[in-house]
Amino acid sequence: MEIGSKIRDIRKRKKITIAQMCDATGLSKGFISNVENNNTSPSISTLQTIASFLKVPLPYLLLEKDQQMQVVKNDARTTTSFNGLKVEHLASKEGLHLRMVEFPPGASMGEPNAHQGVETHLVLEGKLLAEQGEDRYIVEEGDSFSWNACVPHYVKNIGDGKAVVLIAVYSDAELKDILG
């Protein structure tokens, strides 16, 4: 863990000197220097004091780099194709995948399929048929629906124009075959 480096980065970004930090926290300059250089591991109580002074939540200091917020800029999104559908991969974090899927008129996701996890959909544009088991709904812009994905499900664009759906899929399993 690089807690010290994170503390130093936050302190510098906020233009706080080590002397100011020492005065406010009661910690010595040598101790803070050792913490920031990752030469010593402070107690949770000391970390809480530092976090309070820096005005950041204590858990933020404990996050590993890959656990911190991730940003995917609009021009950096990856796009794939699945059964003729355009799939934009918006974000992905610890089993949660957010995608925007464009269905041309008459297009569907293919045959009903099932996989591990849960899905939530928000229709951004168009008119769709959503089916799972005996449930069958026509959904339009602004409507949303969710399901347990282990039961076969199916979505088809039944409108005259394209349909766009924001889909969040959560699964503990790797979902390589689901929507690209």
Image (cartoon, grey):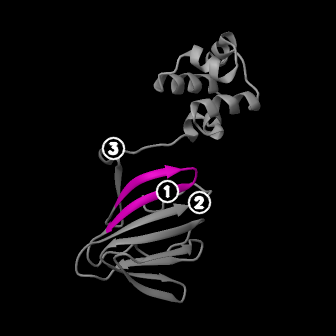
Q: Is residue 82 above or below residue 56?
A: below
For image coordinates 76% across by 31% down, the residue present is: 45
Mark pair 1, 2: CA separation: 8 Å
SS at circle 1: strand
Is mark 1 in CB contact (under 8 Å) with mark 3?
A: no
**Residue 61 in picture, x, y percent from top left:** 62, 34
- Residue bounds of the magenta highlight: 87-102
Q: Kindly identify which numbered label has been placed on residue 97.
A: 1
Q: In the rendered view of the protein, which quadrant contains the C terminus?
A: bottom left
In this view of the protein, which residue sits in the foreground, 65 or 31? 31
Q: Which residue is mark 3?
A: 76
Predominant SS along the magenta part: strand
In this view of the protein, which residue sits in the foreground, 31 or 96? 31
Is mark 3 in CB contact (under 8 Å) with mark 2?
A: no
Mark pair 1, 3: CA separation: 16 Å
Q: Among all residues in the image, which is located at the extreme left?
A: 160
Three-letter amino acid code of the residue under disc 3: Ala
